Amino acid sequence: MARKGDNAKQIPEPDGYAAALAELDTILRELDDPALDIDRLGSQVRRAAELVAFCRLRIEGARADVDAVAALLDGDEDDEDDED
């Protein structure tokens, strides 16, 4: 999820869901600080949005994996019913 553009720095994707949540937590604590440098505000909000999108994709992927496994298990139960 590295930013694209000529002048944008390349920001690496987090190592995983837990790392993304930890980074989000850090950003939220920083945004809560009344002494936050206003020049940093925009970049931190942008990064938080990227991390939220990353987490949503991970959740959707996990949900799809669970649904696929559940469908396989449902198929096994149907096969057992046929054997009776």
Image (tube, rainbow, N blue to C red):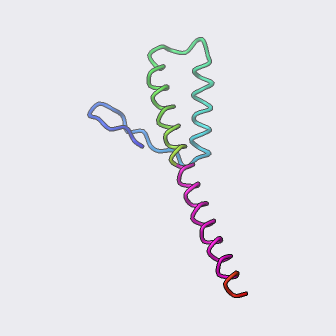
Q: Residue at x 57, y 20 (%)?
A: 31
Q: Is residue 71 left or right of residue 3?
A: right
Q: Is residue 22 left or right of residue 37?
A: right
- In this orientation, which residue lies closer to the viewer: 19 or 66? 66
Residue 35 sits in which quadrant? top right
Q: Position of residue 37 (x, y in %)?
A: 50, 14
Residue 80 sits in which quadrant? bottom right
Q: Residue at x 58, y 54 (%)?
A: 63
- In this orientation, which residue lies closer to the viewer: 78 or 12? 78
41 lies above or below 18: above
- In this orientation, which residue lies closer to the viewer: 73 or 25? 73
In the rendered image, the quadrant that contains the C terminus is bottom right
Q: Main secondary structure of the magenta part?
A: helix
Q: Residue at x 58, y 47 (%)?
A: 17
Q: Residue at x 44, y 16 (%)?
A: 39
Point out the residue furthest to the bottom here.
Answer: 83
Q: Is residue 31 magenta?
A: no
Q: Position of residue 11 (x, y in %)?
A: 42, 39
Q: Position of residue 25 (x, y in %)?
A: 62, 32
Residue 67 sits in which quadrant? bottom right
Q: Is residue 59 magenta?
A: yes
Q: Position of residue 75 (x, y in %)?
A: 62, 74
Point out the residue furthest to the right here.
Answer: 84
Point out the residue furthest to the left here.
Answer: 6
The mark total stands at 0
> Which region of the structure is painted magenta?
58-80
In the rendered image, the quadrant that contains the N terminus is top left
